[in-house]
Image (cartoon, rainbow, N blue to C red):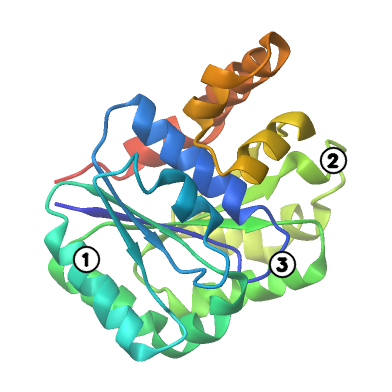
Amino acid sequence: MARVFFVTGSKGGVGKSVGAIALLDYFEMGNRQVSLVETDTANPDVGKAYQKSVKSFSLVNLDENEGWLDLLDIVDASKDDEVVVNTAARNNEGVNRYGSMFDDKLNEFGWPFISLFLINQQRDSCEMLTEYMNVVKHGRIHVVRNRFFGMAPSLFELYDNSPLRQAVEARQGLSLFLPQLATRVTNLVQSNRLTLERARETATLGSRAEIERWRRECAQNIFDKVCDDAPSK
């Protein structure tokens, strides 16, 4: 049975693309079959990088109801694949309008729905997370604090010390950290629309070492926990 991984954050600049790349790389290294859904129809960088590395690739517009129906059909056709949905920043309106229908239907058919909600240190990240939790009632929501914005313990205190974090964890969500990735590697991957593995194969020795470190830390800090948390049925 397909598992649906929703990489989101409801705003631009929180690191959704890097989070999606990390998840796709984790599945690629584990030889998992993936159905990738790209919802950034204007600038589908992640889709262009990974479309040849996944079992299937779809471009879907989640601003409209029809796109959510298409997404349900993709999940239904995915069998035992992992379904990774890389969301666009503008999709928060579509999520608020149609997301509860999608969540309800996945719950009805027993498809695990796992959200990786990336946040930065700003207040609106927490506000958008609250909105998202009010829409997604059944799926598991894990919060990913992006360390690209810094390593100081107090950086994410708006979330860390809030009732919102307690609500996330009361619903069995995890509060996680996305490790910082050196700018030289993010530029290599994103500017050239490369998969992380393809970037590693062509990178300098220093960049290869950074990719391998980041890959290990992403697995240990996030995906070994998240993916074991919701096993395929």
Give the x, y percent position of residue 99.
40, 80
Decide: few, some or many residues near mark 3? Use Cα within 10 Å; few <14, some 14-19, many ≥20: many
Q: Where is residue 158 in the image (x, y as percent from the top left)?
A: 80, 60
Contact (Cβ within 8 Å) of mark 3 with mark 1: no
Question: Which tag, 3 or 1, sits closer to the chain's start?
Answer: 1
Which of discs 3 and 1 lies nearer the camera? The answer is: 1
* Closest to the observer, 27 or 99: 27
Q: Do the numbered discs 3 and 2 sit on residues whose CB atoms are within 8 Å?
A: no
Cβ–Cβ below 8 Å for labels 2 and 1? Answer: no
Q: Mark 1 points at which residue?
A: 74
Question: Which secondary structure, mark 2?
Answer: loop
From the viewer's perspective, is residue 75 above or below residue 101? above
Residue 61 to residue 143: above or below: below
Q: Distance between the residues labelled 2 and 1?
A: 37 Å
Q: Mark 2 points at which residue?
A: 150
Residue on which the image places disc 3: 125
Identified at 33% across, 35% down, the residue is: 228
Residue furthest top in the image = 205
> Who's the residue at 73% across and 58% down the image?
159
Q: Tag 3: residue type?
A: Ser
Bin the neighbour count of mark 1 within 10 Å (Cα to Cα): few under 14, some 14-19, many 20 and up: some
Q: In this view, does 44 lie to the left or right of 15?
A: left
* Horizontal and vertical percent position of residue 164: 65, 65
Residue 107 visible at all: no
Q: Is residue 188 above or below residue 18?
A: above
**How far apart in space, not on screen, are marks 3 and 2 (Cα)?**
16 Å
The amino acid on which the numbered mark 2 sits, given as a three-letter code, is Gly
Which dot marks residue 211? none
Q: Which amino acid does label 1 sit on?
A: Ile
What residue is shown at x 87% (from left), y 45% (from top)? 154
**Quarter of the view holding residue 70:** bottom left
